[in-house]
């Protein structure tokens, strides 16, 4: 099928950047991103591109170049669906918070709503592309909804999972390791392969069956998260044996079978995908009665929870077993550097543990607003919004944040943290002044020579 118009439902961290790059590389295709959230669409349409709802290095430039030419943001969902030959579903698929599979399974209600909406509106044949990460065999459900409309329209369903990582989304999209397309119809697969083919070499475009494609995405995220839990497990052992986790990571990473990437010990992984996708994998395995498989992957999450917990426990015990009434400065709130995304960020859980011990928390993150910090804590429902507001304050600079603090906890690996005047920070803190470096980004010798009591993960 010749594609002249694309519609993407969901203007989020995945839909926004992916469609911006498709539009840039395919000037003859009109790409419309639609979303039910009016505020979000208005932000995508803001003349001032620094106000886009998502921060990704390089994104604003591409939006500026393509918006209004062949990239459009709109809330007119039905019109965009009706006009397009190809529709991407890129809505969120959070972990279920109710009913069967609560806390484990993916909530597919938004995906189903999209399928029903497409079924209702479509008057011409469509290729429907699953972009959201979905449980294996979801395409079956989408197919059944679409094919039961009785209006004679032909639908082809493709799975095209997105592997971009936040903070490097544009680079990952421009130069992907691979693009994966799963489907039944060769014609539909080639229509999508042609779109990517305008910038991705053909040998990096993999064609598989739908189920392999869906399962590959869950598996890729599970393997990546597993590496982090593996190195984090070793980090705890390092702390008891005087081994240094960075040295261990380097030594094993030079084995070409292991490889050097994704071996940074940390306070634990966050982000919208790893935990959700592994829980989903565990749920699916259990639903087939594969308990050994489910237990194996579940351990990756348990170890990650343990890592976050032991970071806050260590902070509390080091501060003489009490943080009540003490100011703790948290540098970083985002789940990783170069993003304003805080979903599942370790900072939220560490803050929550410290708040249970009645600490006062001061937060500085270069891209996260005070409103977001409060919303993240309120979402946990551990205490009232008023209490969170009283106990947690956000600041616009690291020096104010750490003034009179008893300890600093580094939660995100923002590059700018390395450039601070640490002497000045030290001078304005309570003594002894502690740093708990959850990202191993500061130099131990330098920090100790200033006078800090410095500790980091796995050393
Ligand atoms: C997406 C996914 O869908 C998730 O499964 C995958 O793991 C990562 O990519 P992301 O783009 O990060 O998630 O989600 P989010 O930033 O929440 O964006 C989703 C958008 O869809 C939101 O703007 C929301 O308003 C919109 N939406 C949701 C709709 O337009 N319609 C709906 O019915 C539901
Ligand atoms: C991940 C996958 O990398 C991506 O392919 C998929 O499409 C979505 O999920 P993302 O969550 O955006 O991407 O970021 P990623 O770079 O994978 O980091 C996830 C978390 O792991 C972050 O909290 C990060 O700080 C942490 N991490 C990563 C470590 O703790 N150590 C590492 O070595 C790498």
Image: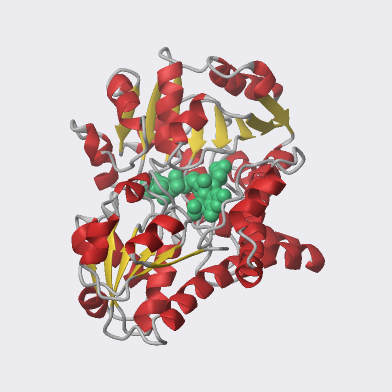
Kindly give the residue lying farthest to the top in the view shown: 28
Give residue 442's position: percent from left, percent from top. 42, 54
Q: Position of residue 402 (x, y in %)?
A: 25, 65
- The reply, left or right, for residue 205 in relation to residue 60 is right
Could you say which quadrant of the image residue 27 lies in? top left
Query: Between residues 168 and 191, which one lies in front from this camera angle?
Result: 168
Q: Quadrant of residue 211?
A: top right
| 407 lies left or right of 106 | left
Q: Residue at x 41, y 34 (%)?
A: 17
The answer to whether residue 150 of the structure is visible from this angle is: yes
Q: Residue furthest front?
A: 449
Residue at image x 30%, y 20%? Answer: 65
Colouring style: secondary structure
Residue pictured at 44% horizontal, 51% vertical: 336
Residue at 49% across, 71% down: 311
Q: Please give left or right for residue 115 compared with residue 42 in the image.
A: right
Check the picture and name the quadrant holding the C terminus. bottom right
> Looking at the picture, how far across and down is residue 14, in whole percent?
46, 40
Q: Is residue 129 above or below residue 220?
A: above
395 or 124, which is in the foreground? 395
Residue 273 visible in the snapshot: no
Disc tally is: 0
Asked if 136 appears above or below 287 in the picture, the reply is above
**Quarter location, residue 143:** top right
Q: Quadrant of the N terminus?
A: top right
Query: At which x and y percent is residue 46?
Result: 20, 35
In front: 292, or 247?
A: 247
């Amino acid at each position: 099928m010749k594609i002249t118009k694309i519609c993407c439902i969901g203007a989020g961290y995945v839909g926004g950047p992916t469609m911006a790059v498709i539009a840039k590389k395919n000037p003859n295709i009109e790409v419309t991103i639609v979303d039910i959230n009016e505020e979000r669409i208005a932000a995508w349409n803001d003349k001032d591109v620094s106000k886009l709802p998502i921060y990704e290095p390089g994104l604003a430039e591409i939006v500026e170049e393509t918006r209004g030419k062949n990239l459009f943001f709109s809330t007119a969902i039905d019109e965009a669906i009706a006009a397009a030959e190809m529709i991407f579903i890129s809505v969120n698929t959070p972990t279920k918070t109710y009913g069967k599979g609560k806390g484990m399974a993916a909530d597919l209600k938004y995906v189903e709503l999209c399928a029903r909406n497409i079924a209702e509106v479509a008057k011409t044949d469509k290729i429907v592309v699953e972009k959201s990460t979905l449980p294996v065999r979801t395409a079956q459900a989408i197919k059944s909804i679409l094919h039961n409309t009785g209006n004679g329209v032909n639908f082809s369903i493709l799975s095209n999972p997105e592997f971009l990582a936040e903070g490097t989304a544009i680079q990952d999209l421009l130069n992907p390791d691979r693009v994966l397309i799963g489907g039944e119809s060769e014609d539909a697969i080639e229509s999508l392969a042609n779109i990517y083919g305008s910038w991705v070499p053909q040998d990096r475009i993999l064609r598989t069956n739908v189920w392999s494609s869906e399962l590959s995405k869950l598996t890729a995220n599970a393997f990546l998260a597993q590496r982090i839990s593996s190195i984090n497990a070793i980090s705890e052992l390092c702390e008891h044996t005087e081994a240094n986790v960075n040295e261990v990571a380097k030594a094993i990473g030079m084995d070409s079978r292991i490889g050097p990437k994704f071996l940074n010990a940390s306070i634990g992984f966050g982000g919208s995908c790893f935990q959700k996708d592994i829980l989903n994998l565990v749920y699916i395995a259990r639903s087939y009665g594969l308990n050994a498989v489910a237990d194996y992957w579940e351990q990756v999450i348990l170890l990650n929870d343990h890592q976050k917990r032991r970071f806050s426990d260590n902070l509390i015990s080091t501060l003489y077993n009490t943080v009540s009434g003490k100011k703790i400065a948290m540098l970083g709130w985002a789940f990783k550097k170069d993003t304003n995304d805080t979903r599942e960020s370790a900072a939220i859980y560490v803050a929550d543990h410290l708040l249970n011990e009645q600490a006062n928390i001061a937060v500085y993150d270069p891209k996260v607003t005070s409103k977001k910090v409060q919303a993240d804590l309120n979402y946990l429902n551990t205490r009232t919004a008023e209490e969170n507001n009283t106990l947690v304050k956000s600041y616009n600079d690291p020096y104010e944040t750490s003034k009179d603090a008893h300890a600093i906890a580094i939660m995100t690996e923002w590059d700018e943290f390395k450039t601070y005047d640490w002497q000045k920070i030290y001078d304005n803190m309570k003594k002894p002044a502690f740093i708990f470096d959850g990202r191993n980004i500061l130099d131990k010798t330098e920090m100790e020579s200033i006078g800090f009591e410095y500790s980091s993960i796995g050393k």
